[in-house]
Amino acid sequence: MAGPLQGLKIVEIAGIGPGPFAAMLLADLGAEVLRVDRPGGGGLSMGDRDVLNRGRRSVAVDLKHPGGAEVVLRLAERADVLIEGYRPGVAERLGIGPEPCLARNPRLVYGRMTGWGQDGPLASAAGHDIAYIAITGTLHAIGRAGGPPQVPLNLVGDFGGGAMYLVAGVLAALWEAARSGRGQVVDAAIVDGTAHLSGILHGFSSLGVWREERGTNLLDTGAPFYDVYATSDGRHMAVGAIEPQFFAELVERLGIAHLGLDQNDRERWPELRRLLGDVFRTRTREEWTKVFEGSDACVAPVLSASEAPGHPHIAARGTLVERDGLSQPAPAPRFSRTGAELGLPPCSAGAHTREALAAWGFSDVDALLETGAVVQG
């Protein structure tokens, strides 16, 4: 089935991390996304193993060639959206910034993905996910009591605070453009998105129920009923029994309900943590999984990426799929009528230069290939 974004045409200036993820999501939902790669590729691309590059065709454009920028501007004329992830000013120097693109196509939504944003003291500085989430207060909040902040991979910054906000911004700007007839620039900064994601922490803090000390709060492993516990085989179970009825189910399944434990007695949290740890260490992860099967205790086995596809729920929903020998997440979210599906598999830079440009209405592809402005991969 065609996705809900069928008919939407997007030009993606290839980058790394959040930009490709945003483009993958948009392609999963049915948009026609054309990736503009540099000849030979670059960055962290893994070629046909790069899940983030699935669902779209690739053209290789030499933006250092005198005719390279013109190719991108011609694509922008035919597109609804263009997204790029350069540092501020780079797209302008290459001749493909918002001004010339919007001059060619006033309805264009021009999405910009950066870490620091388009302005501010750090706008032109290098950076990565870990630094972006550090200055928002988010990284400081993640970790155990007495320990250093723990790095949440690059999920919170690059993908949560970055890519998802770029997608939201682009779709919001498209909605507005449909009524006004005018495009605009979307400034999606990881620092902004990450700070926005952490709104609940600011709310808790304003109420005085969130301490700055890591590992002392409800959701940061401070509460013993919201944590992970080792099993006898060295694996782990995740426990999230916050509500009293779920906690009651937890201690019942663990066989310690008779102890009359009070989950809200913070003074006895260390004692409760030791008790839960001791009990979980008496059985294997598989055994505990069976104990909690069908319960409302909010307990689940902690699975690795290679184990996850075999979980009955993940398998039943097809949350993770395999195609061409590559395990990958299925498109999300799901739609009752329009659907969403995997598109083209990941490809190398410029794999579709000739066919994609022709499909986008270029009648001079051979000439462009001869000049070197574009390259067939």
Image (cartoon, helix red, strand yellow):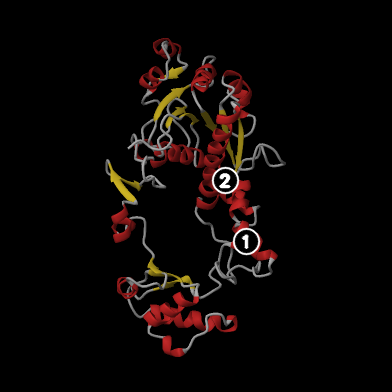
The residue sitting at 47% across, 16% down in the picture is: 373
Using residue 318 as the reference point, say whether residue 251 is left or right of it: right
- Considering the image in quadrants, where does the N terminus appear? top left
Q: Is residue 85 visible?
A: no
Which amino acid, by three-letter code, is at mark 2? His
Rendering quarter of residue 216: bottom right
| Secondary structure beneath label 2 | loop
Q: Is residue 264 visible?
A: yes
Cα separation between marks 2 and 1: 23 Å
Q: Are circles 2 and 1 on residues that touch, CB within 8 Å? A: no
Which amino acid, by three-letter code, is at mark 1? Leu
Give percent across and percent down for residue 180.
61, 28
The residue sitting at 52% across, 22% down in the picture is: 76
Give percent across and percent down for residue 131.
61, 50
| Label 1 neighbour load within 10 Å: few <14, some 14-19, many 20+ | some
Residue position for label 1: 201
Give percent across and percent down for residue 225.
49, 75
| Residue lying farthest to the right in this orientation | 121
Above or below residue 372? Residue 257 is below
Residue 128 marker: 2
The residue sitting at 59% across, 57% down in the picture is: 139
